[in-house]
Image: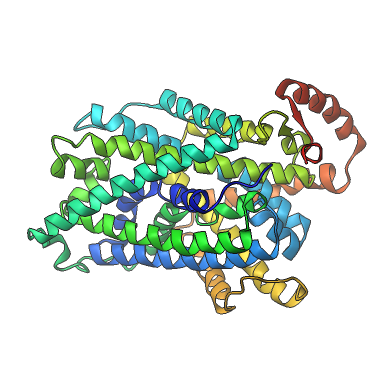
């Protein structure tokens, strides 16, 4: 695969993937977890700081280990193949496609809400399926096309954020500050509730690590990877805080929690008769985030296949289009499966639980390699206190909801992650011959059908 043209594309990938459905869905859940406007805004700011610290750690890792695949190569270098495999197993089978499903559900929900005023929209599975299929096809066709789609939708989502923020500033200037006058009244102090608020806030920031999935395709990653992080994540943080303040300039906390789609309700009250532009641009925003998620998910599956931790066909590349089409198609099919029974809030909670396990382990790998891999060059080197803080916060985010409100689903999630060893031992560690006999003819048929070749033949 060829390097992608940077500066705009790299920043657009980070900003375009982070600003998706989260800022239009998570505000309700963050307010539920904090109970008041003040703590809600503090959580949004703290999430931005945490995302920036995590991204700085990933900037060091990405310029030290020049491999695509996100956390996968870092866990491989820091802790060995078993943990790297468990990450790839969990992320490829559950985390990435469920994230894609959440965004597709959000896209469909916002597309339907304006047509059903005063009530929740009906089942939108067919719209979700269409969105997932279109995005997968776009990413299979061309890397350049996927980048152009990402740039266009990033521009669109920044435009709607500017519209919301400017509207909020005008309303505040007119004296609509009643919801911000006593911001900490009624605040919640529950250990687990704050943890869940952080889960939902951090879901909106998820995507800060997306460039690490395509390190091998970046031009001049030593410069452009940290530059995109320094520009992109603070920009998103400021946007999120200002958008929430704008929401509170119109909606009381009770109205905020009762709204089926906060941004649409805001638009109906402030922008009428042009309120239709809010759901339209929110659909653009979620579509762009889904495109970025699909783009990077395919690269993880591709790298895992190349390393032998997924079936070999996943590492093959299209002869004509230079895209990892088998990996992209596999991710798209799994996402469609997750869309069918999906509940957005539940998916966010369990997605965040598992994801922050691996974020914490990756930053721990950075600390470990400071002592075990001193020979590696580090063009970017962050103070060690930053990965230490990220590891501590990761432990809190993983343990707080379990301690406050234990549920079987957390155990199921853990069992699923560890259960990957049942496949690792026979298929990867021992490499039984009978598995190769089964996979060889299947790989050959898929290779002919999809017109793909092993990656080394495209160099």
- Which corner quadrant of the image does residue 423 belong to? top right
Q: Is residue 102 visible?
A: no
- Image quarter (top left, top right, bottom left or bottom right) of the C terminus: top right
Q: Does residue 443 lie above or below 406 as drawn?
A: above
Q: Position of residue 257 (x, y in %)?
A: 24, 49
Left or right, 94 with respect to 421, comes to left
- Foreground pick, 277 / 437: 277
Q: Position of residue 139 (x, y in %)?
A: 57, 34
Q: How is the image coloured?
A: rainbow
- Foreground pick, 94 / 407: 94
Q: Does residue 218 lie above or below 338 as drawn?
A: below
Q: Position of residue 425 (x, y in %)?
A: 82, 47
Q: Position of residue 23 (x, y in %)?
A: 35, 50
Q: Which residue occupies 89% across, 29% down? A: 437
View extreme (right): residue: 433
Q: Does residue 277 lie above or below 183 as drawn?
A: above
Q: Is residue 348 visible?
A: yes
- Which corner quadrant of the image does residue 2 belong to? top right
Q: Which residue occupies 29% across, 66% down? A: 39
- Which corner quadrant of the image does residue 270 belong to? top left
Q: Which residue occupies 21% across, 55% down? A: 246
Left or right, 333 with respect to 37, comes to right
- Image quarter (top left, top right, bottom left or bottom right) of the N terminus: top right
Q: How many marks?
A: 0
- Foreground pick, 220 / 69: 220
Q: Does residue 312 lie above or below 9 as drawn?
A: above
View extreme (left): residue: 174
């Amino acid at each position: 695969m060829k390097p992608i043209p940077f500066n705009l594309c790299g920043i657009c990938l980070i900003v375009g993937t982070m600003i998706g459905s989260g800022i239009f869905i998570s505000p309700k859940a963050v307010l539920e977890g904090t109970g008041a406007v003040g703590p809600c805004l503090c959580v949004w700011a703290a999430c931005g700081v945490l995302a920036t610290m995590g991204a700085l750690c990933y900037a060091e890792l990405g310029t030290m280990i020049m491999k695509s695949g996100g956390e996968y190569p870092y866990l491989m270098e820091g802790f060995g193949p078993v943990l790297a495999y468990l990450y790839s197993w969990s992320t490829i089978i559950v985390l990435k496609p469920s994230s894609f499903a959440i965004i597709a559900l959000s896209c469909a929900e916002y597309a339907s809400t304006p047509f059903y005023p005063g009530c929740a929209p009906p089942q939108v599975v067919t719209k979700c399926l269409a969105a997932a299929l279109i995005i997968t096809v776009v990413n299979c066709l061309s890397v350049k096309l996927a980048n152009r789609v990402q740039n266009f939708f990033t521009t669109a989502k920044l435009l709607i954020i500017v519209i919301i923020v400017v509207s909020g500033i005008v309303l505040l200037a007119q004296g609509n500050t009643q919801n911000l006058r006593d911001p900490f009244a009624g605040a919640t102090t529950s250990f687990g509730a704050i943890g869940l608020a952080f889960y939902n806030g951090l879901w909106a920031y998820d995507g800060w690590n997306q460039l690490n999935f395509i390190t091998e395709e970046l031009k001049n990653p030593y410069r452009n990877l940290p530059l995109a992080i320094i520009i992109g994540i603070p920009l998103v943080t400021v946007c999120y805080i200002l958008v929430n303040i704008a929401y509170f300039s119109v909606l009381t906390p009770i109205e905020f929690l009762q709204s089926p789609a906060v941004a649409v309700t805001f638009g109906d009250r402030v922008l009428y008769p042009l309120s239709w532009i809010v759901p339209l641009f929110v659909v653009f925003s979620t579509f762009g985030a889904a495109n970025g998620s699909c783009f990077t998910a395919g690269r993880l599956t591709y790298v895992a296949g190349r390393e032998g931790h997924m079936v070999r066909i996943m590492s093959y590349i299209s002869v004509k289009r230079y895209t990892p089409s088998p990996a992209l198609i596999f991710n798209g099919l799994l996402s469609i499966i997750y869309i069918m029974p999906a509940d957005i809030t539940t998916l966010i909670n369990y997605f965040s639980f598992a994801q922050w396990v691996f974020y914490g382990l990756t930053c721990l790998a950075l600390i470990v390699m400071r002592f075990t891999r001193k020979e590696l060059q580090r063009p970017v080197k962050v103070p060690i206190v930053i990965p230490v803080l990220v590891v501590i916060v990761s432990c809190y985010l993983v343990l707080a909801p379990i301690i406050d409100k234990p549920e079987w689903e957390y155990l199921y999630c853990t069992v699923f992650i560890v259960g990957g060893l049942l496949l690792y031992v026979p298929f990867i560690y021992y490499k039984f011959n009978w598995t190769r006999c089964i996979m060889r003819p299947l790989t050959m048929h898929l290779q002919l059908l999809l017109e793909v070749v092993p990656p080394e033949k495209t160099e």
